[in-house]
Amino acid sequence: MITINGHLIYKICQLHPQLLLSRQYCRVFSVINSHIHTSSGLASKDHYKVLVLGGGSGGIAMAARMKRKVGAKNVAIVEPSEVHYYQPIWTLVGAGSKSVASSGRPTASVIPSGVTWVKSKVAEFDPEDNTVHTDSGKKISYDYLIVALGLELHYEKIKGLPEGFEHPKIGSNYSVKTVEKTWNALKNFKEGNALFTFPNTPIKCAGAPQKIMYLSDAFLRKTGKRSKANIIYNTSLPVLFGVKKYADALWEIVKKRDLNVNLRHNLIEVRADKQEAVFENLDKPGETEVYKYEMIHVTPPMGPPAVLKGSLLDDEAGWLNVNKSTLQHKTYANVFGIGDCTNLPTSKTAAAVAAQSAVLDRTVSRILKKQTPDKTYDGYTSCPLVTSYNTVILAEFDYDGQPLETFPVDQSKESRVMYHMKADVMPHLYWHGLLKGLWGGPGPYRTIMHMGMK
């Protein structure tokens, strides 16, 4: 049970002592006292008009939007975690320019006030009966269900991990447990190979595996170690980036900075005690190659939530099976999805969640009125490709991989202004816009910037 007193603060700070360093936590007592939520042990009822599964960016944004639609008492959110993280900033944490503390806030402080917080994990779906079961044995029924469960990291699918993270010289920006290890490996780099990997699965923020490569290159140049470093990016993909316009710009950076890129190379084993990484050549099955490393950044294989796989809501690959235009489930009309857990054929990013939230808000509103959804999601997503400690290439594109840029400039060019947006503006927009259900992506501003033209 979560109480609205110092117990929550004490517990969070026990689990995450680094959060004590954040100025955010000077406000925790007042924030929690202004947000009265009900834990799973105190839930006042077992039926909600709208039930939201997941307390990540999509879940919190939609809970805020649904609160305004149907009232706080009619909305509940199922989420086990006590801390909510702004994960896009972890790229900069791994490069030493931001702190872990700056990325996290108590979940209680981001759940909309008055909305019931069921502090449990989802254990089972029963869409035929409009119910969800939690791991605490609770059965919750709903009129409408929004699934926002994110995805799961699978370090264990790489031989030698996650236990390999107990050794130095290895890190990963994809987990709060390992992101600071990336920075430790980078700042303690002496001489040899610096390895960066991209797995053979769908992942969230597909640009992040190479962002940390560019930042590491910049750091090693700044500290006079670049001449002693051989920087290698081994990706399972057949391309450097999925959108040609930005891929072409990135290839130019790769050549200019003497970075080594190997396509169709997939990490299958880490021998952390020997500082060795084993890669398979996806174009030549059975062929492997061992790389020695002085540091390695691992991007883990990822997949749909285990509870979703094999349920009545998933597709053949285990992702939530939704209509790519309306985000409504293809079988169950009162079920909707948003974010990384869905099978939407676009890059899984917070920017995509923002755009999806605006569409889903409209879709649910129409369904509530017994009307047909009339707003269409075009697959908009964005990836601020950090190329140094002060430059970004801001990639924005749609389902078809066509650039869908907000600003009337060539965004494939490195930009200091875009870096400032990534590092300073976007976090503020996340906490105070997206999570409040007030930011639905830059679509309206893009129209203005381009004077009505796409």
Image (cartoon, rainbow, N blue to C red):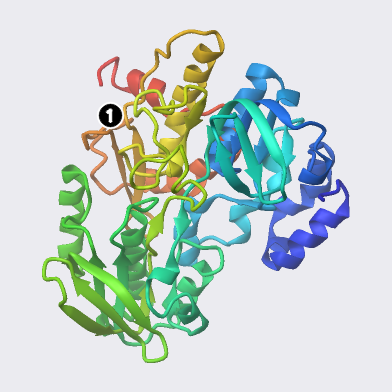
Q: Position of residue 213 (x, y in %)?
A: 32, 66
Q: Secondary structure at mark 1?
A: loop
In terms of image quadrants, where is residue 294? bottom left
Point 42% across, 14% down: residue: 373
Q: Quadrant of the C terminus?
A: top left
Crowding at dot 1, Cα within 10 Å, few <14 / some 14-19 / many 20+, comes out as few
Q: Is residue 419 above or below residue 214?
A: above
Q: Residue furthest right?
A: 5
Q: Is residue 269 visible?
A: yes
Q: Could you say which is closer to the camera, residue 161 or residue 329? A: 329
Q: Position of residue 79 (x, y in %)?
A: 65, 46
Q: Position of residue 247 (x, y in %)?
A: 19, 50
Q: Is residue 298 above or below residue 446?
A: below
Q: Residue furthest left?
A: 284
In terms of image quadrants, where is residue 290? bottom left
Q: Could you say which is closer to the camera, residue 358 or residue 390? A: 358
Q: Amino acid at mark 1?
A: Pro
User: On the rendered structure, is 194 left or right of 175?
Assistant: left
User: On the rendered structure, is 130 left or right of 106?
Assistant: left
Q: Is residue 370 above or below residue 156?
A: above
> Circle 1 sits on which residue?
408
In terms of image quadrants, where is residue 255? bottom left
